[in-house]
Image: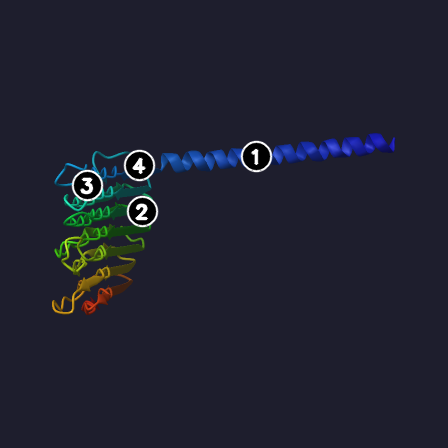
Amino acid sequence: MANKTQFSGARASLERWLKRLVQSTSMLLMLAVGTLVHAETRTEVGVAGAHGVDAQATASVAGDGEGGEGATVDLSSPPLGNEALYDSTAIGGRGGNGGRGHTRADGGHGGPGGAASARSAINRDSGPATARASAIGGDGGHFGNGGTSGTGGPGGSATASGVASTASADAIVVEVTARGGRSGDTSTGIPVEGGTATITEARAESNGGDVEVDATAISGRGGSGFPNSNGLFVGPGGRSPDVVLRNVVDGMTSGTIVLRQTAVSGDGGGGFSQPALGISAPDSGDTVSFVERMRSATSLSIEATAQSGAGGQGTYASTGGRGGNADAHASAD
């Protein structure tokens, strides 16, 4: 009798556990379906460029690396439905390295990194909305050694924008990031810059709900410079581009507005030089982040940040590069 009671109790416990499992699974499925119905996420990755062909014994030059494939994602047109989230990511392909030469054959040049462009724009009749856009430029390919070594490829550019709005009194969030690609290492004495970073727009609108906008642009780091195989002992490396953001972020609502805007430049690449040449390593890019907005809202908060990278490190007799200037200004009325 005791064994039967224990068995019945165990069976009842098992049935209750299975029931809870089914309920939990159903809830997870409902959440998963809801996420799929109300969100649109896309990622595009460019194909890397092929490396240059190495020079044969009878050849006079090695092949150049191919450029990385560009990547573009646009979640703005045509409208995709009543999604609450648009999330776009574009990543440029890496440039191929230059082929290797030999004493009688020049090395190949590195290929450029692929450009990246991402845009998310969502407009809802009601309900909250989030727009995210991230663009990452591809890195440039490195030089190939040879009788005269090649040049590195420039970093790929990155361009991003995000816009979101709702006609109801719901919250809106916009997050936009652009990051330029690193330039390839170089060896011809010709500096090659990292990729530029541009944000064209970052804006949020609500009919009374809180809005938050965050935009960050980061330029690509410069590649390092190396002595050339032909005896030219100079390699200035690459500079990181300037980053300038002026009133990129914006928000409209009678509720709370939070705006953040950040400009960052990459580091300069390392340099190499003979004593008599006195070549300096490259500088870092300058940065400017400027925001002035006048809005009738419950509260308005603005943050503007500018950060410049370090100058390139000097090697042998090369002097170090200069860190970039950084200028930030924010005004809220």
SS state under label 1: helix
The answer to whether the residues at label 3 and label 4 have Cβ atoms under 8 Å apart is: no
| Disc on res. 65 | 3
Counting from the top left corner in percent of width and height, residue 330 is at 21, 67
Counting from the top left corner in percent of width and height, residue 265 is at 22, 60
Q: Quadrant of residue 52?
A: top left
Q: Give the residue pinned by disc 4.
A: 82
- Amino acid type of the residue that numbered disc 1 sits on in the rendered structure: Gln
Counting from the top left corner in percent of width and height, residue 223 is at 22, 55
| Disc on res. 23 | 1
Q: For this view, does 151 lie left or right of residue 210?
A: left
Distance of label 2 from label 3 (alpha carbons): 39 Å
Distance of label 3 from label 4 (alpha carbons): 44 Å
SS state under label 4: loop
Please report whichever mark, 2 or 3, sits nearer to the chain's N-terminal start.
3
| Disc on res. 130 | 2
SS state under label 3: loop
- Amino acid type of the residue that numbered disc 2 sits on in the rendered structure: Thr
Judge depth for marks 3 and 4 and give the one in front: 3
